[in-house]
Each structure stands twice: as C-alpha cells, then as structure tokens.
Image (cartoon, grey):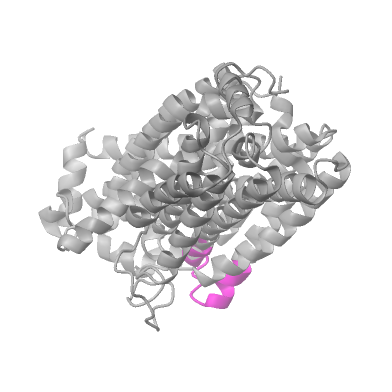
Amino acid sequence: MQSNATATGGSTAINISVFAVFVLITLYIVYRASSRNATASDYYAAGSSFTGPQNGIALSGDFLSAASFLGISGGIAVHGYDGFLYSVGWVVAWLLGLMVIAERLRNTGRFTLGDVLAFRMKQRPVRAAAANATLVISLFYMIAQMAGAGALMALLLDVHTRTGQAVVIAVVGVVMVLYVLLGGMKGTTWVQIIKAVLLLLCVGFMTVFLLGKFGFSLSAIMETGARHSPLGEGVLDPGSKYGGGALAKLDFVSLALALVLGVTSLPHVLMRFYTVPNAREARRSVVWATMLMAAFYLCTLVIGFGAMALVGSDTIAGAPGGENSAAPLLAFEIGGAVLLGVVAAVAFATILAVVAGLTLTASASFAHDVYANVIKRGNADPRSEIRVARLTAVVVGLLAIVGGIAASGQNVAFLVALALALAASANLPTILFSLFWKRFNTTGTLWSIYGGLSSSVVLIVFSPSMSGSANSIFPGVDFHWFPLGNPGIVSIPLSFLCGWLGTMLSRSGADPAKQSEMEVRSLTGLGSGLK
C-alpha cells in the first residue's frame, strides 16, 4: 500500500493537470453553446436539436456516473458476484424506458416531468408535488456523486482528513454550477457526450489490457482474483454480501426493485427525452444508451475482477476512499502515474458532468413548474424564468456540497441505489397511472407522489444506511428501526396503493376530454408544441 500512496502523491501534478485541461476545454465549449440560449426551450431542452445517437451518448453519459465507474468496479473487486448485481439491474432497467416510457413521455411533455403529470390534473398542486419530488431525488443523487469526488481525491492526493475532502467536494460543486449557469441544456449535453466517449475509451482500454494480460481469458482473471480475496472461491458465487440469511435476501430483493424500476424514473434521465425533435429519435436515444451501457458494464466486470487479482480486495478496502478506489488503484498498477492521471481525470469528468445534469434538472423543475406555473400561473417572462433557474442551481449546488461532505466515504453505488428507490417510489407509479389509467385524478396523483416520496425518505432515515452499523453514514449513533438498507420493497408498492386509494376515495373525477387528448398526444405527438 505504501508504494501506491507514494506513487499517487508523486503523480499529483499529472492528475491535477489533466483534470484542469478537461475543465478548461469543456467550460469553453459550454460558453460557446450558451450564446445560443435565446429561449426557455434552448435553456431547458437545447431547442430539441440533438439527434437520437447524440442524445443516446449523452444519456449514457448522464447515467454512467461515479456510481457506475468507481462504485460498481469497487463493489465487484471486494464482493465479487454480488457487486455485479448493480450492473445487471441498471441494464435491464432501460428496457422499461424503451418499451413504455420514452416515446409517450417525449410526446406529452415539454421540459419537465411536471408537464406530464399535470397535463390532465389541477396544475398548481401537481406541479408543486412534481417539483418537490424532483428536488429531493436530484439532491440524493448529487450527494452520491459528491461523495465519489471526495473518495477519489482522498486516494489521488492521499487526503485522509475530512477537511481536505470537504474542500475537494466544494471545488467540484463550484465547477458544476458554472456548467449550468453558462451552458444550459445544450452546453451540459455536449459535456455529457465528451465525458461518455472518454469514459468508454478509458474502460475499453483497461479491459483489453487486462484480458491480454491473462491470455484473453475471463475465467483466468476471476480465478486469480478469487485467490487474492479473503472470500476465496465464494467471491464467484452469490451471497457474499446479500446471502446472510432471510433479511439480507429480502434486502437484495428491495435493492433489485429500486435498480430496475428507478432508472427510467430519474428526473434528469426523463428530461433528456425533450432534447430530441420527435418520438422516433427518443426511442433511438434509449437504444443507443442501452447498447453503450451494456458494453460499459461488461467492462466493469473485467475491471472489478482485474482489480481483485492485481491489487487485492484487502488493499482496496483499506485504501483512502475504500471500495471506490479500486479503478484508480488498478490504473496505477497497470499503467503507472500517467494512466492513473487519465483515469482520475475521466472519473472527475464523470462526476462533474452528472452533477451538472442533475443541477440543471432540479433548477429547471423549480423555475418551470413552481415559479412559472404555480407562482406566476403560467404568465412568467422567459428571461425571469431562466434567471430563477440559475439562482436555483446555485442553491441546489450548495446543498449538494453540504450533503456530499456528510456522506463522504460511502460506496457511491449504494448511495445512488437510495436515490433510485426515491425515484421509483415517487415518480414511476404516478407516470404509469397518468399515462394508462383513465380514472386517475388529481387526488390520486398527489397521494402517489407524496406517499411514495415521504415513505421512502422516512424509511431511509431510519434504516441501517443512516445509522446503527459500521457502514452507516452516521456510524456513531443508532436510531434505526427499519431493518432493510433499501426501502424499495415497501415504498414502491405503497406508492401504487396510495395512488389507487386517492383516486378511488376522491369525490372529484378525471377529466375525460383531457384524458383523451393526453392519450392521442402520447401516441402521436400531435399538439405537443415541440419540433
């Protein structure tokens, strides 16, 4: 471990230089793109000017976050088979987006999820509820990315103090807010495309190198990894993390539900469907994103077991940043300080791009749904609406910095799974009911959103994720009473139940004319007002 720490410290100049070059180049691109942000449509949806393949690459860039690159490779390197389950869940999840959500959502809305959920409901309460859900989900997701930034810098600069990691997280937060303030959706999308290409090239190179080193035999990599893991051959079988009895298995089922149902309910993923000109390009976006992410996650399998084989599970677990350090440590092992610097820059680019997309989504939801349609009742000036969005981005960025500092040291894939549980609980039932249930009404919408959101937040706060164990965010205290680490198995069905009960018990019925209009628009796009 000492050689790694010394080498990492010696490569500080390379790491920072490569990262600085990326930030300067992308800030310039964002600045150039910002000159075309003349309307709200330009700022929120890039004027619907991207093609399906372009948006698919950006969509994969939006989702391939620090959780995917650092968290999953680290989870595989330490837990083996059980760590790879995150990858499987996230790839399968995109089938739901492709077959059910992408086309209908693109045709029905304009800029935000609130446009869809409020289409045939009372505008003000539903838009406010949608904005609240978007802000909470985005903040949880951003906290995970910020924690990844702190973990990465802990390894690269050998920073062991919480203060040092806090400074790093603050710097990342400031840069991401600059992306949003300057570039809007168009600039953020180009950052996502650049970052996705760099990330795929990086993991592709590492995968080919590792396969070549072990005679292009994945079995050889896995067998060597098992010999360097304290779990031995058990690391290749299910159960190393989620096999400790009935409760652990139930926790895994809860996690799986959150992974599969949460991805296409994430507000920043849903907002991407409005950056393409029509529903056909929205479908092509999801196809491209699914292919790219499937390839990426197959690479993380090789990288995770490669790190286990060449670095060792114990070394990874004991390094600054814990499990999140697996990919950087492996990069140093196979390519020295230069490759470590490149991987570090790509990881930082990943974090910056994802949190920029999240910040834009959260600020757009508040400005468009709350300010323009709730406070101003649909009569807001576009310039003032964009100004409010930019101010909201600053506030959201500050909150994410504070949350990231509190969650520093946690596995980012695990933290993202909590955000997915929130999205699947608050958004998915409401989306499906709105699109497919004719009787669904405003009361059902509010009960579904707030029921799913509040139940999942409460269960997370009082779960082992927050307190009561050595791996909790607050390990020194114990106030948990919910036994599962992920609330999905309770909060997702509860949200469906709340939506059904609210609809059935409400005295106000659905609007048949609006429902028919929404059905036609969701299938054809007629009347959407988008290009």
Q: Is residue 411 left or right of 528 when viewed as pictured?
A: left
Residue 167 colored in magenta in the image: yes
Quarter-wise, where is residue 219 in the image?
top left
Q: Name the residue rendered at 64%, 30% in the picture.
A: 274
Horizontal relation, residue 131 to residue 300: left or right = right
Q: Is residue 115 above or below residue 313?
A: above
Pick the front one: 272 or 300: 272
Q: Position of residue 456 (x, y in %)?
A: 44, 59
- Can the viewer see residue 393 in this picture? yes
Give x and y (percent) for residue 359: 65, 51
- Front position in the image: 441 or 423: 441
Please give the range of residues in magenta. 150-168
| Picture quarter with the C terminus | top right
Location of residue 380 with respect to 152 vertically, above or below: above
Instruction: Looking at the picture, tell me which residue is in the foreground, 527 or 395.
Output: 527
Describe residue 314's horizontal placement relative to residue 359 as left or right. left
Name the magenta segment's main secondary structure. helix
On screen, residue 110 above or below 258: above
User: Residue 452 or 69: which is nearer the viewer?
Assistant: 452
